Image (tube, helix red, strand yellow):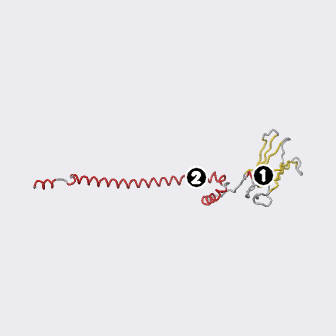
Amino acid sequence: MDDDREWREFIDPDDLPHRRRRGIKSRSLRKRSIFRRHSAGRRLSRFVLWLAAAAALLAGAAWQVRAGYLAPLSQFAPLRPALALFCRAAECSLPPRMDLGAIEIHNLRVAPHPHIPGALAISAETKNGAWFNQPWPRIRLSQFTESGQLLSRRTLPWPAPTGDAEMQSGKEYALQLELLSPPAEGVRFEVGVVRP
């Protein structure tokens, strides 16, 4: 019995099997809790990095929309309310809606100018066939040879409008142009419209 008591006194309690197991378990729990803290920190830093990357991508997309795609996208009626909100936040102006294909030009007439010798008077009738009012476009006057070869092309401002700030929907307008330096004989003219 006395030998057993002495033996117990000299044995290190940490070396006993049940103590060793408890010690290992407590150490592994400590390691796991540290790992969990590190992984939570890593998750947070990854989340912040992803958030920053997403914000940078959104800012880049917004810049691209404002710089290059705002005018074409603003022509679609369903997108205009959202683009108006975007422009309010991005401090830009929403371009007016235009449909150049809806502007009809017909009855083109080319004749000698009644008051200026050697000049030409070009007249046509135009109509805004769109269901909405649109800004006055610019006029593109092209000159072709009889064989169809392009001689020249000029872009001119629309002549002084007749009291309307915009082309009214469904309204017809008379277009009058003067050409002071007419080309040689056998030239045909074509009148179109382009964005202002």
Query: What secondary structure is marked by label 1?
Result: strand
| Local crowd size for mark 1, using a 10 Å CA cut-off: few (<14), some (14–19), many (≥20) | some
Which residue carries the number 2 mark? 61
The percent coordinates of residue 6 (x first, y second) are 12, 54
196 sits left or right of 188 in the view:
left
Instruction: Say which amino acid is labelled 1.
Output: Glu
Pick whichever, 87 or 171, lies toward us.
Answer: 171
Residue shown at 76% from the left, 55% from the top = 129
Number of the label disc, if any, that sits on residue 187: none
The percent coordinates of residue 117 (x first, y second) are 89, 48
Instruction: Say which amino acid is labelled 2.
Output: Ala
User: Is 136 placed above or below 147 here?
Assistant: below
How many labels sit on residues?
Answer: 2
| Residue at the outermost left position | 2
Query: What secondary structure is marked by label 2?
Result: helix
| Residue at the outermost top position | 147
Which residue carries the number 1 mark? 104
